Amino acid sequence: MNLDHYDQYWNAVSSSPNKERDHLKNKGSGEALGAQTAMIQNNHLGNLKRLFDKAGVDDWTAHIDHTATYNSNKQNIIDTYSVDGFEKDREKKLDRLEAEEEKLREEAPDDVPTTLDEQLRRGQKTEINDDVEVEHIGSSINNNSNSNGEEKNGVSVGNNYSEKGNDKIQSQENSSTKAISLSKARSRCLQAVEKAYNSDRVMLLDALPGIGKSYSAIEAVSTTDTPITILTSRGRKGRYAEIRSWCQKHGLSSKVLPRVDDKCPSFAGKHGPPLEQKLKDYRNLGVTASDLHTHWDLPCQKGSGCPYESEWDFEPDDYEVIIGHYTHAYVEIIVENRVVVIDEAPSDAFLTEFTDPHTTITNFLQQTSNIPFSNYHRLLTNSDSKKKELALNWFNQKGIGLGNSKQILDKDSDNYHIHTPLLVLGTLKANDLGNNWSTSPLGGGQVFSHNQNLNKMYVLDPPTLVNAKNVVALDGAPTPRLYDLMLGLNFNHKQLLTDTERERYIRHTQNIKIIQTELKSIYPYSSGNHANLDRDEALLREVAKRHSCQPAVITSDRVLNKLKSKNIPISANSTYYGNLKGSNKLANEDVGVILGSPHYGDPFIERWAALFGTEATGNGQGLTKSYGAFGDEILQHMRENEVLQAIFRFARDGSGSTVYVNTAAIPSWLPREIALGVVRKRSTIERDIIEALSDLCVASGADIARETGHNKNTVRSNLRKIQQEGLVRKTGKKKGTQWHDDGLSGANTCGLVDLNSLTDQTHNISIGDIGDKIEHQLEQYGVDQHERDRLLGDGTMTNWRTN
């Protein structure tokens, strides 16, 4: 109902509307209009106005008796004006729901249990038949009580939990919502892939994790009779094996492209470290393993030949599916006349970084005549337009393919990288972006950029895929313009699910319950330097206690190692950002905690923006920090999208999971609940008091002070803090005061943590409302006004959004 009804009524009937309605709100539950919360009261007023509209009464506010109950007002209108109430609407809805229920029963298999008791007795989860779309109708839950429905001192107590995972039986939304079934989502994905294979337009399919993008890519080969080359990240032998198993399931022939370090004895060091190092040095200059085997007679080629070369001796047409790494896209024979499938973003697979451009450029210039620069420094500082013109004319005549493998392999020393000519050309043509970066497009999708502060140069060299039948990219959280840049193509972006379907897919289809425990800090954990391990430990121990299990953690590699070194109870399957792509390691984990967000530093964002041809300079801090239009897209790709991918690592087949997200860097559209999380860390004094009173059971403040060795006043002050949590109880007065253990065995000794949801709304949350709730809870926990203001400053709440 429109909120205007609320103010319209009270402003019409009272000269002091705020005082009147506040008085009525405090009268008690259900006795008079206004006795409920403000939103319920407004709904009542809106319903009554609907009846007046039916009766044709305009001056509706004058006909309401605010001292009577809602039902009395409703019946009076029906009797006075001879209008129908809402019973007919309700009967229609019940008839519709009964008809839908009967239809579902007819469509369900004969052995499906029909009651909750039967489901529980048979040990089944309360899941809907995967092939049927179902309407969820439920009611909101009082979020101010804990799992046992109890409160202490008006504060929700989050210590007594026994549920595990997502409880499998979740509360439903307040309104009717229709969720797409997992099978239908996957069927839609398959159809989209099939259509993309048969299209003449390069496609970027945006499908949330768990829908089965990669599997559909293989299945579509059999349904469309289309040969593909599917390219994914390196270091995923398990991933390659998984794709091959899908091929076998569909009766498809497949070939995994060999990796030289695994298959070539020379590269593996079996013919001596000097040769191994020499091969790696040349490969670092951009020379391919194939060219190294062709140009030199290597020991591995003796006798029966090199296994690596043997595995490359095949006919691509003999295989319906070829599986490899992104860089295999440079090999013409495996992309020609095939659909090339890019499985997730290739990141820097086609990007070469030069940390010491001085040496390679100087070597190239000294071996190349007719370019009027003798070294790197003279090239970089040139201000002579005639010299620049001479050099550019030389490139126009000779082309830029000078750094081919043969020229490099024929030299024994003073070598340069195969892309060095591009560095020289890029420097000659560079446009300064004004933020200590310069850039230059080189044609054919190739781009040069230069970080002048760090003196690093980059060449982006996308593969030439003009002879591929088509290119189809699959991603769960893509950044379309970054895909265009990385691959030098103009992708058509297709989002598989609508925004509404995505929200319901997460909450109902995949049954993922997301609880955000941090609204202000993004916690950039990549370096490990900003980790707050004490707070993290408090959160992890509370989650472990609540769910009676060791939660699986996703964080940065460095922070994960620190957690392990402290022996904090976490799952052995815990992993890190950067190790998630294509991974199902956490598929059976139904409780997860995401600590912090990835951030690779400003140069990462500035680099990709420069390659795109635009300047990116960070302004602001935390959630408010912005790098400009394209820079912010890169920021989201690096940060929020990786957090999204992390969330979806848990419970991938609709089995359900609870995921706690301890960072403010979360996609704004993502449906989630909000909890306070770590309110504060425990001080040493608090820990000592908890330990002492746990042993003593009952003691005076002086006794506890003697036991702990702390000042009496300090002990009493901290006892009052712990009392506000409902963990200790005080009896007596003054010198007769006694403190009682009232639940210290369940206390989190690392910190005060509240995991109860502040609201069951996940969309359109009023910033003011959520801020008031948070402040109220903090006040109940004894957090003083100064600290509340710091935590909930106007900037924090006004910049935080949930949709």
Image (tube, rainbow, N blue to C red):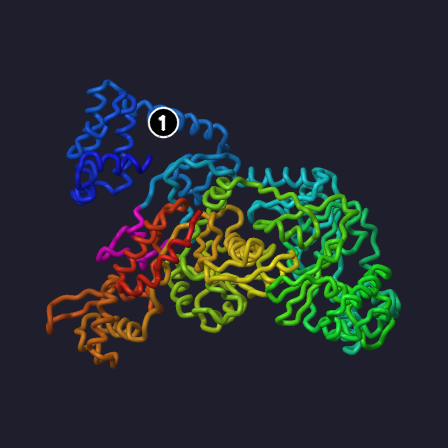
**297 or 75: which is nearer to us?**
75
What quarter of the picture does the N terminus occupy? top left
Is 19 left or right of 280, judged from the image as shown? left
Disc 1 element: helix
Q: Is 500 placed above or below 552 here?
A: above
On whether residue 151 falls in the magenta region, the answer is yes
**Residue at x 20%, y 36% (from the top left corner):** 33
Q: Which residue is mark 1?
A: 94
Q: Position of residue 537 (x, y in %)?
A: 41, 67
Is 326 left or right of 631, judged from the image as shown? right
**Residue at x 46%, y 58% (from the top left corner):** 624
Q: Which residues are magenta?
A: 142-164
Q: Is 765 placed above or below 175 here?
A: below
**516 or 466: which is nearer to us?**
466
Q: Would you identify the image quadrant in which residue 349 lies?
A: bottom right
* Crowd band around label 1 with a 10 angstrom C-alpha radius: few (<14), some (14–19), many (20+): few
Is 166 left or right of 131, judged from the image as shown? left
